[in-house]
């Protein structure tokens, strides 16, 4: 689909440019009609040459399928899935998207392929080492499966939830299969669905205008929650498996206790979406962390006070 778009836009701009040149020649030289025709023909054949050079072809797609319900998938994702022969996805996606997966070779045994655990197992000990070995073995199987399929001329689509490029656990595949010219099909992130669920302009935070997307500090990085929160702008936390307590304690360092927070659970799922409002100072009393599912985002910031600044729908 994307190739088709590139092709039509590419030839449109080239022919407009050459049309202008042709008109100039006609105005300035009466003897040059034959020459012009030759030039136009040459430019057309040149443009198709350029298009062929730019056209990317692949048998490997990383497809964002959105945060939950099937109707939040893009048309491009649907078309890519329909054209694929082999699909790798979570079991949950196999169920939610079942109407698009009929007749496909389905694999959901590769869920939870976390890159952290695909590193050299000798770096770890005890339980972590065992997990690292298991993941490494799983990863090798996945790589073999994809390469065998592509070599046999089949198209493989790996489905990931939300947008695969935002804390996506499958991004490593883009490096692994770089030689296959992987194509990423963007998806609607849980962040987009949660913004809509809140119905507030998240960039309208009173004295700030920025949104920070971040995750728990268990991921080794310099931009800790404490450092990021000095401006008290809107922050959205992708929680993954970090403790709720950890987030609130880190946020409490720079945000005053009265700062509002919102927990958006299962954003984009008609049967599970839920919002809990609280503040940094009262969160532990008002929210039971044990009740939170894996799919929840924490929003922090004064924009949550601005109930009147509803996004137009
Ligand atoms: C590994 S990240 C993947 C994020 C995904 N790539 C995206 O764009 O939404 C998983 C985390 O994203 C958040 N998440 C994913 N789906 C969600 C949903 N439907 N509602 C709320 N949060 C969600 C949660 O914080 C979860 O722990």
Image (spheres, rainbow, N blue to C red):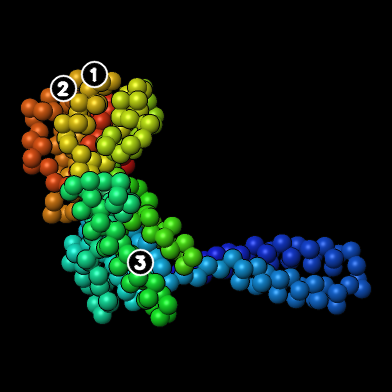
Label 3 sits on residue: 143
Q: Secondary structure at mark 2?
A: loop
Residue sitting at x 38%, y 59% = 173
Residue 38 got which mark?
none
Query: Who is closer to the viewer here, 172 or 201?
Result: 172
Q: Secondary structure at mark 3?
A: helix
Q: Pointers 1 and 2 in contact (CB under 8 A)?
A: yes
Residue 206 seen in this snapshot = no
Which mark sits nearer the N-terminus, 1 or 3? Answer: 3
Q: Nearer the viewer, mark 2 or mark 3?
A: 3
Residue 149 seen in this snapshot = yes
Residue 47 is left or right of residue 33, and the answer is left
Q: Is residue 135 above or below residue 55?
A: above
Mark 2: give few (<14), some (14-19) or many (20+) Cα within 10 Å: some
Query: Who is closer to the viewer here, 303 or 87?
Result: 87
Residue sitting at x 89%, y 72% = 32
Residue sitting at x 30%, y 29% = 225
Label 2 sits on residue: 281
Q: Is residue 245 above or below residue 152?
A: above
Residue 256 got which mark?
1
Which mark sits nearer the N-terminus, 1 or 2? Answer: 1
Q: Residue 300: image x %, image y %?
A: 25, 30
């Amino acid at each position: 689909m994307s190739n088709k778009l590139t092709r039509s836009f590419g030839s449109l701009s080239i022919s407009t440019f050459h049309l202008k040149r042709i008109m100039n020649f006609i105005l300035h030289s009466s003897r040059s009609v034959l020459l012009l025709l030759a030039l136009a023909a040459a430019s057309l054949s040149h443009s198709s040459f350029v298009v062929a050079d730019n056209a990317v072809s692949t048998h490997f797609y990383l497809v964002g399928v959105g945060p939950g319900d099937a109707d939040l998938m893009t048309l491009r994702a649907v078309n890519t899935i329909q054209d694929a022969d082999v699909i790798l996805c979570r079991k949950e996606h196999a169920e939610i998207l079942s109407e698009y997966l009929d007749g496909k070779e389905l694999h959901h045994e590769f869920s939870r392929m976390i890159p952290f655990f695909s590193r050299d197992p000798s770096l770890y000990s005890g339980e972590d080492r065992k997990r690292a070995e298991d993941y490494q073995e799983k990863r090798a199987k996945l790589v073999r499966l994809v390469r065998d399929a592509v070599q046999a001329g089949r198209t493989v689509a790996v489905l990931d939830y939300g947008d695969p490029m935002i804390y996506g656990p499958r991004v490593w595949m883009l490096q692994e299969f770089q030689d296959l010219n992987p194509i990423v099909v963007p998806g609607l992130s849980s962040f987009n669905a949660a913004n809509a669920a809140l119905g507030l302009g998240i960039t309208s935070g009173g004295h700030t205008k920025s949104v920070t997307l971040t995750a728990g500090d268990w991921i080794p990085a310099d931009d800790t929650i404490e450092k990021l929160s000095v401006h008290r702008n809107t922050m959205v936390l992708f929680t993954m498996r970090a403790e709720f307590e950890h987030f609130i304690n880190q946020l409490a360092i720079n945000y005053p206790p009265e700062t509002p927070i919102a927990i958006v659970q299962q954003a984009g799922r008609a049967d599970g979406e839920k919002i809990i409002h609280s503040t940094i100072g009262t969160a532990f009393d008002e929210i039971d962390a044990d009740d939170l599912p894996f799919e929840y985002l924490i929003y922090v910031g004064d924009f949550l006070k601005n109930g009147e600044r509803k996004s137009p729908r």
